[in-house]
Amino acid sequence: MTPLHHPVPPRLTRRLLSLTLPRDHRPYALADLDEEFEARARVSPRGARSWYRGQVARSLVPLVRERLRRWGRPKITDRTRGSGGRGGWEMGIQGLLRDFSYAVRKLSKAPMTVLVTVLSLGLGLGAVTTVFTVINGVLYPSAGWLRDPQRLVTIYTTEDDGTAWGWNSLPDFEDVRTAGSLADAAAATVKLLSLDEGDRPVQVIAQAVTPNYFSVTGIRPAQGRGFAPDEGQVEGGAPVAVLSHDLWMGSFGGDPGILGRTIHLGGRPVTVVGVAPEGVVSRRVPVRPDVWVPLDEAAARTSDDITARKAREYLVLGRLRNGASLEDLRKETTVMAERLRRDHPQAWTDNHEQPRKFTVLSERDSRVNPRAKAVLAGISVFFYGVTGLILLIACANVTSLFLVRAVLRSREIAVRLSLGASRRRVVRMLLAEGILLGMVAGAVGIAFAGLLTRAMRSFSLPINVPIHLDFTPDGRSYAFAFGVALLTSLVFSLIPALRVSRPTLVPALKEGRTSWGRPGRRFKPGSILVAIQFAASLVLVVGASLFLRSLHDATTMDLGVDPDGVAMTTKKIPDGLDRAGTVQFYRHLESRLAGAPGVSEVALSRSVEMTLLQVGAGASVSTGAAGEPPDGEKAFRNAVTPGYLRMLGIPLLRGRAIEEEDGPDNAPVAVVNETFARRFFPDGDVLGRTFTLTDRSPGAAARDAKPLTLRVVGVTADGTYLDVGDPPTPYVWTSLYQDQAPTVAVTLKGASAEAMVAALRAGVERAPGEVPVIPPTTYASQLSLQFIHLRLASGMLGWGGGLGLFLALIGVYGLVSFTVTQHTRDIAIRRAVGADATAVVRGVVRQGLGLAGVGLILGLLVVVPAARLIRGVLVGVGPADPVSLVGGVVLLALTAALASFLPARRAAHIDPMTSLRQE
Amino acid sequence: MTGKFLPEFELYVMLAVARLGDEAYGAAMRREIEERTGRPVSIGALYATLSRLEEKGLVAMQASDPKPGQRGRPRKYCRLTPAGEEAARHSTDMIQRMMEGVIWAEAPADGRR
């Protein structure tokens, strides 16, 4: 132990400096620093140590720069000191730099090697880096705009279905913010508002926040201010907003006079009081809010207390009081939840009759909704798997290229070894080439990833929900790409370097041969690499085929709806209409559209099957039968006007469809599908029976949705209503006149869907500031969104498989032509003793197919279990689909045959005499 | 040598050598420059510059064995070579000549005439 009166400089730091100092000055510079350190340590040992560290930190750059300068102009004394691994660090760095400059010269003479390596590795690295960037961006978003984030926490309330990560209600938020271990807490929710600036209103994402949101999170507006405490409560007062950096730059052209300007937001004038810093992302949903508005708590709580407590729509962020820990808060909220459960038993019980709880997570752990994390992790494994295979194929390709290169250079290497170069030196020389290429490939990969992520950003869906996730490669992506590049380049250069520098090569030099050390040995590492390539390519090709066949099945299968000539949009019903007025509005809208040219059918509905409007269409069913669970089983529902079922071609089996007579004053009726009838009325005919439908979707309580008792009047055939590939689900259609909706889908049918889109655009009038959730589009294009994951996966695997196939082709071609060159003499002898050209070709091609065959068997062993993992998303094909498997094998075998045929033909044309004379 | 300008920090190092005379070794020079210029100087920057000056033949360095009172620490003393003295003198002369007649404004922000 160091005595207190004799402090010593920080040891590691001192060692670091010692390594960087030029050898001739080393002891003196260290002694100088020690002297000053000692003088300072007499005053303050701690201060002295920190001074020492500062000295060393600032010394590193000038010292390294001086070394590089010296290396550029070596002095006589340096050279006389001799070389060859003796000089430690100094010689090491000089040797390394020499190795690299040698590698540059050597590689500039082999442009094809460079091109093939950099391109294939670059593509592989680019693919993996893209996946890394996207997944990193989604799973580990940065939040640099938060102040002191380690004191920030997120509070969740148990969801209806019993999962822990649900949002909170406003009354619960007001209770929880009184917790003693919280300094303060803020609530936020997200809504879509229209921004009426310029020629057309656009939809913007607004984050409605309690006025203290900016102070709790520590987000400091780049301009202006956040919200004043009273700005949340003003009803009819002057509304204010904080713009996002992007909205300010985009919609307002970066107007320097933006503060105090009045904009038209959500149909009313709003004063801009601030601009947020760049890049702030909401965590309520993973989007960048365009604008922040104060949450009008009074207006948000218009309904009674129970309804308000059930309206769980708010993200709650808390800031811990100084000295309070996450645990303190957890204890407090547990007690609080118990009290809330006693006071509000109805609101504080979930659907399984279990008490709800608060769950507290640190801000860091809650950047991604914990519920989404598991799903994202699964998806990321798939994408890493696919791109990892591409990289593996590229890596195998480059390794065999380097093996061949090393063998061709074995004479040069043998000369070096026999002249006294150490094996280490030779390996280092070859390694330098690999690392150099790897780094260039890494840079190409990053450029490629940049292109891919940019392409992803511009990818947009035909719906009006502007979710823009940001996938720009950042420092982490660069580090990842270069790290992987370094690892792969070590693999592909170390294996050949170690093999070729074996001392057994010196005798090979004497014999004048340039093949492998041990005679008669097959080119084994190369064969293994080709086998790996073929195995990986088979996995990709079979995967692509499975997804393409799923896509084909999904797009051609009978969905139970007919999108021909159908177009749709959404329309918000004006506020303040009573039930009769709403029906009148519906009827008026229908009759006006029916008069448009070319329109043959018109219908309105709450949602449209298999579109995003179906989200939250679940409701629980109760038939009043004895012994059924209190909440009933779930069914999905839609409310429609009379023409709807006929328009979409949903076949009616028994009874009648929804008719004009099912108006607001008559008894509510329902049409159900066969599965519904079987599930809920298994004992006999369903017509005339009644059941109760209760909306259980999130936010239903806030919408004041009342249970509906319905009489069954008709039964339809089963169809697909939610997602392609779903098993038949119980489904209910009610009358829109009886079961009204504030926003309806408007569907038109005519000879051409495009003409109907035009008719919708012309015929559906919009209130000022109204932006439709789904702008007028064809129903077919909305349906195609259903297959987006299949399209994405088959596209990715298709490209990956194609790339892999191409690389495997190059791999086999390279290896076979190499072995042909190596065995020129054997072939010549065989030809000389009478083998004909066809036999030679057959022999070589057989060799190529043999290489591929091992890989294909390996691939088959892997691909079937791998495909089983994606069974859930496949439509119409099983994981062991024989067409895909046989097709993949045949395709790859053909590739191998083609790749080996070319060198085989060359071999067959060798003139035996010329070749033998050369040897 | 006379035609060349010395970089600023090299000149400081040479002036420190000249000022300290027989006591011109690393730690003393580092302190001297830091105290006089008020600018933090790292030991690494000093030795990197000394190597360069030595290579140009402007300073000569002489290692000495630890003397009593140095707690066994070796020192390397520097002195200016004749060429070094000539170069330093030339540089400072040029600075002095350039300074002649220069009148600084009181406040640089609004001192434009």
Image (cartoon, coloured by chain):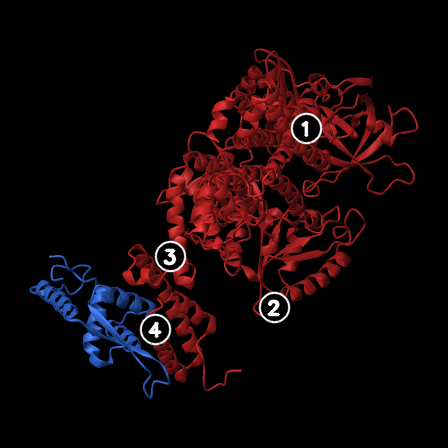
Q: Where residue A139 appears, x then y in whole percent? A: 59, 47
In the rendered structure, which amino acid carries the disc numbered 4?
Ala
CA distance for labels 1 and 4: 68 Å
Number of on-image labels: 4
Q: Nearer the viewer, residue A526 or A448?
A: A526
* Residue labelled with disc 2: A324
Foreground of the two, A537 or A729: A537
Image mark 3: chain: A
Disc 3 or 1, which lies upstream in sequence? 3
**Residue that mark 1 sits on:** A546
Q: Dot 2 lies on which element?
A: loop
Q: Colour of chain A?
A: red
- Look at the image and tell me whether residue A101 can be seen: yes
Disc 4: which residue: A29
**Whether label 4 touches label 2, CB < 8 Å:** no
Residue nearest the observer in this picture, A874 or A213: A874
Which tag is nearer the camera, tag 1 or tag 2?
A: 1
> Crowding near pointer 1: few (<14 within 10 Å), some, many (20+)?
many
What's under tag 3, amino acid-wise? Gln
Q: Say which label, 3 or 4, has the lower sequence index.
A: 4
Q: CA distance from mark 3 to mark 1?
A: 54 Å
